[in-house]
Image (spheres, rainbow, N blue to C red):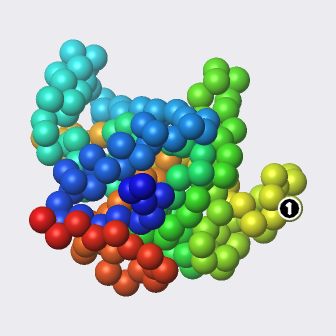
Amino acid sequence: SYPLEKPHAYATNPEVNSFNTRVYDRALTEKYEVKAVDVVIGDLSKSMKDKIMQHFKSTDKFKNRNHTGQLETVLQLAVGLDYDVSSNENQDDGLVNGATCKLKKIDCDAKGKPGLLWVQFYDKDVGRMKRNSYRSKTSLPNPEWTPINPLTRVFKCQSQYISRIQFPLCIASARTIDKTQGKTLNELVIKMG
């Protein structure tokens, strides 16, 4: 049987995205697809904001998180899958691009949409400050779980700025070979072309 649960490395982003989607689709745990909230910033008419948003949504460049503050347009969440932090939140706490965790729990808001994620980092020092901060306000579902809130990032589209709100995570069942460098992994399946 093929080792789908093992970390994979591929040469290209399309191969990585395809494998990550395959793993997500096969997950039998609690799942959500979270769409980013995008807003044109500035004192502009509604029609001008609509025009900029239409250009933004139709431009391929903005479908890649490298151009949207490292935040996904649609984030696929499944409890039990591995994720990487995609956008720096707190460098002193290790909550930085590439920190790897397992999604443990999804707390939904009153509308039934994910509002807070609970993850467990493989490096126990990552998120320690955030866990301690939450622990002083409320009880954690598990003392080793770190809460992940949506972040806001601002980026430029044409001559205007867009604000995006999204959880700063991306599925990490597969990564590019470049992104895998520097990771400490016990096992790895590599696709070499």
Q: How many labels were placed on the picture?
A: 1
Apparent side of residue 108 relative to residue 25 in the rendered image (left or right)? right
**Which quarter of the figure has residue 140?**
bottom right
Mark 1 Cα within 10 Å, few/some/many (few <14, many 20+)? few
Q: Which residue occupies 53% across, 52% down?
A: 81
135 and 5: which one is in front? 5
Q: Is residue 86 above or below residue 75?
A: below
Q: Is residue 46 above or below residue 136?
A: above
Identify which amino acid the numbered label 1 is placed on. Ser
- Please indicate whether residue 74 sits to the left or right of residue 168 in the image: left
Q: Position of residue 22 (x, y in %)?
A: 36, 43
Q: Is residue 14 visible?
A: yes
Q: Position of residue 92 (x, y in %)?
A: 57, 79
Q: Which residue occupies 13% across, 36% down? A: 59
What x and y, as percent, mark residue 121? 61, 68
Q: Quadrant of residue 90?
A: bottom right
Point out the image quarter for the C terminus.
bottom left
Q: Which residue is mark 1?
A: 136
Q: Would residue 117 appear left or right of 156 to someone viewing this image?
A: right
- The residue lying at 28 percent from left, 70 percent from top is 190
The x and y percentages for residue 168 are 47, 53
Dot 1: element = helix
Residue 71 visible in the shown view = no
